[in-house]
Amino acid sequence: MTREDFERRITDLLPDVSDQAMKNWLEYAKNLDRDGTETESEIFDRSFVELALIKRHQGMETAAALFNYGEKFVFNYFELRGAAELLKEGWPLERISDHAVENGCDPTLEAMEESHAALEEFQSGKWDTRENKRKFSSDLSQGIRQFYALEQGLGGQDGTFSEWIRAAYEINEDFDQSFAEIVSGLCGAFHDADAQYGRDISRQLYNTLAVVLPTEIRSAAQYLSLGGSLDHVPALALVGFLMEPQNHDSMLRAVKHMNDGGDAASAYYAAEGEVFKDHSPQCQQTM
């Protein structure tokens, strides 16, 4: 993972980590990468997995204590599990760090095998899928509250929030992302549309579910604001036109094309200022 991913994941895993500890962990990885010992991304992957397993077995307090001790001393990722066991036995962190320097802090064979399997799961993407499924119940409760608040704010049709909950689930039924991320993305798109193009347009898109992806919601709002018809929106979404942001003039040309009876499949070319006899590039005429 990248430095940014590591910071985000650790902050989500252990909300009370210190800024100085984070800075030192990043510097530790950078130094090992620079001298050729191991790449930053591998260190970040392995450190995150070890801390997640410590949180699972010894609790958040132990995992956070080991990470935050990075203000003074950054443990090697392969010593974290052993250090966690000593911390739970009552050893002070200063003694554990001295022990790590002098003798190492080896984990048990069982812990090593678990760490190896967990790293494979994480790097294959299965870890995130499992975590997203595990969090779905709590994310769903929060998502319902978010969509209900959005509905009230937009003055949307009563009960439509339940249809958006279903849509959010269907968008991400393989759990590549957390349900919370999907809901936040959709609500954010409606807030953007509301702020930029007005309440009537954002309410129309909310009530009709004419489009159900954040990028499409923003593009559809722009399309409607320039005189486009809501009836055209599903067809434009179907051909992928609304997945690409358009500037004002391009979108205006697309609106004119559709309002003049043009088909959605040619909307992209119309937006670019081209007229087609059919859908193939060989038949284009430049305006």
Image (cartoon, grey):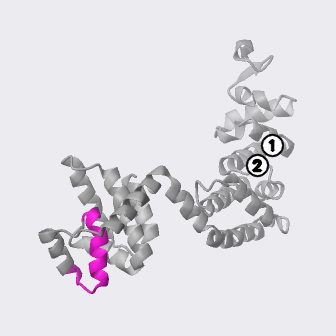
Determine the CA span between mark 1 and mark 2: 6 Å
Along the horizontal axis of the image, is 206 left or right of 174? Answer: right
Quadrant of the image occupied by residue 56: bottom left
Along the horizontal axis of the image, is 18 left or right of 140? Answer: left
Q: Nearer the viewer, residue 19 or 85?
A: 85
On-image quarter of the C terminus: top right
| Mark drawn on residue 177 | none
Residue type highlighted by circle 1 = Pro
Please, what secondary structure does the residue beneath circle 2 have? loop
- Start and end of the magenta stretch? 76-94
Height in image: 174 above or below 235?
Answer: below
Along the horizontal axis of the image, is 157 left or right of 272? Answer: right
Quadrant of the image occupied by residue 147: bottom right
Which residue occupies the extreme bottom position in the image? 90
Q: Nearer the viewer, residue 265 or 14?
A: 14
Height in image: 139 above or below 86?
Answer: above
How many numbered marks have been drawn onto this rendered protein structure? 2
Query: Where does the image place residue 14, in percent across and percent down from the top left?
Result: 42, 72
According to the image, label 2 marks what residue?
Answer: 211
Query: Where does the image place residue 43, in percent across and percent down from the top left?
Result: 31, 55
Residue type highlighted by circle 2 = Val
Q: Are marks 1 and 2 in contact (CB under 8 Å)?
A: yes
Quadrant of the image occupied by residue 88: bottom left
| Mark drawn on residue 234 | 1
Other-residue count near label 2 (Cα within 10 Å), few / some / many at <14 / 14–19 / ≥20: many
- Residue 160 lies in magenta, yes or no? no
Which residue occupies the extreme top position in the image? 282
